[in-house]
Image (cartoon, rainbow, N blue to C red):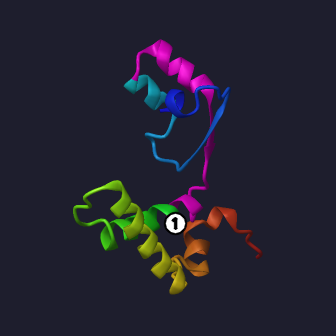
Amino acid sequence: MSDTHFPDAKKICLVQDNLNTHKPASLYEAFPAAEARRLVERFEWHYTPKHVSWLDMAESELGVLSSQCLGRRIPDKQTLIVEVAAWEKDRNKRHTKADWQFTTADARIKLKRLYPRFE
């Protein structure tokens, strides 16, 4: 894909979450060593924070899109474009927001090493 869509790019910035499959080593599992090395050197790896990343929000929104809009057969690309645009317009009209259940109190417990302690 990188060679097809970005054949002239010297570096490609990858922004990813922290899944164990999203590491340079995974390329060595998928490709011969020389090809994996070529790709590893071509990519610049950036990882989102492990907690409350924007990528998590995007993945959640794609899940909602899939369940509300794409859970059926769509006959062609144009229909897909029209359907997704209508879904997006409705989501935006409703000002739909992420409903994070992770409170500050939860964060102080789960991420206690990041919070200062005053005693």
Camera-side residue of 11 and 92: 92
- Amino acid, disc 1: Met
Quadrant location of the C terminus in the rendered image: bottom right
Asked whether residue 99 appears in the rendered view, the answer is no
60 sits to left or right of 13: left
Q: Which residues are magenta?
A: 31-56
Q: Quadrant of residue 32?
A: top left
Residue at position x 62%, y 67% in the image: 112
Q: Was residue 75 drawn as part of the magenta stretch in this picture?
A: no
Identify the residue shown where x is 61% and y is 23%. 41
Is 83 situated left or right of 105 in this image?
A: left
Q: Which residue lies most toward the bottom here?
A: 94
Residue drawn at 53 percent across, 50 percent down: 17
Q: Position of residue 61 (x, y in %)?
A: 45, 68
Q: Quadrant of residue 75?
A: bottom left
Q: On screen, 43 above or below 97? A: above
The residue where tag 1 is placed is 57
Q: For this rendering, which residue is in front, 7 or 18? A: 7
Q: Secondary structure at mark 1?
A: helix
Q: Is residue 47 left or right of residue 28?
A: right
Please provide percent x and percent y for residue 14: 59, 41
Front in this rendered view, residue 43 or 101:
43
Indicate the position of residue 100 as horizontal and vertical percent values: 52, 77
User: Is 45 a magenta residue?
Assistant: yes
**Name of the residue lying farthest toward the front:** 78
Query: Which residue: 23% across, 65% down?
Result: 72
Question: Is residue 11 something one can see in this rendering?
Answer: yes
Relative horizontal placement of residue 65, taking residue 100 as reference (left or right): left
Q: So how many labels did they put on this image?
A: 1
| Farthest residue, direction left | 73
Q: Give residue 69's quadrant in the image.
A: bottom left
